[in-house]
Amino acid sequence: TRFVLVLLLFLHTVNTYMDRICISTAKEAMQNDISGLSDQMMGYAFGIFAIGYALFQIPAGWYSDRAGPRRALTVVVIIWSIFTAWTGFVYTAIGLLVVRFLFGAGEAGAYPGATRALYSWLPAKERGLGQGIFHSGARIGAAASLVLMPIVIDAIGWRWTFVANALIGLVWG
């Protein structure tokens, strides 16, 4: 059970970074399709995700402690997956800012929930290894995104790529 938990959390972290980085790969296609999406506005879209993420990290950690990691992670992944999908349905720069903020707020519980799960389900002597495997998923997800997302965007378009990424999160949840 512990090994399954660590594997699921590893995949969870891969997914967080694939969802986050997809927008960087889709930037040019998005700018061609969304009115008013200049380079500066795209920078705001990148930054507002971080603001939502930072503002909701503490409440998400509290929620993970209160609800338990299984429930918290399920809720968090479903919420951020919904906003990942909604990214594919924005048609204005302001709409993108709103969705990216909400996506960041939703994803803020990813690490607190996973850390709580590792703390709850792994013995102290295995937590360092569990954290190492869990955190490596972020780097693998980031690297994989840079290779996979352009292929997926070329195949199904940037809008459906966000929906496909959301479906992965919903399945995980």
Image: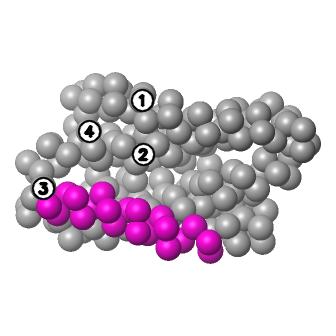
Image side of residue 22 versus residue 104, left or right: left
Residue 146 coordinates in the image, percent (x, y)? 34, 30
Which residue was labeled with disc 2?
19
The alpha-carbon separation of the residues under discs 3 and 2 comes to 20 Å
Name which residue type carries label 4. Answer: Thr
Magenta part of the chain: 40-59
Residue 157 coordinates in the image, percent (x, y)? 22, 37
Q: Closest to the observer: 156 or 135?
A: 135
Q: Secondary structure at mark 1?
A: helix
Which residue was labeled with disc 4?
25
The alpha-carbon separation of the residues under discs 2 and 1 comes to 12 Å
Residue 171 coordinates in the image, percent (x, y)? 57, 42
Q: Specify the quadrant of the image occupied by residue 150.
A: top left
The alpha-carbon separation of the residues under discs 1 and 3 comes to 23 Å
Name which residue type carries label 1. Answer: Ala
Name which residue type carries label 3. Answer: Asp
Which residue was labeled with disc 1?
143
Q: Is residue 96 visible?
A: no
The alpha-carbon separation of the residues under discs 2 and 4 comes to 11 Å
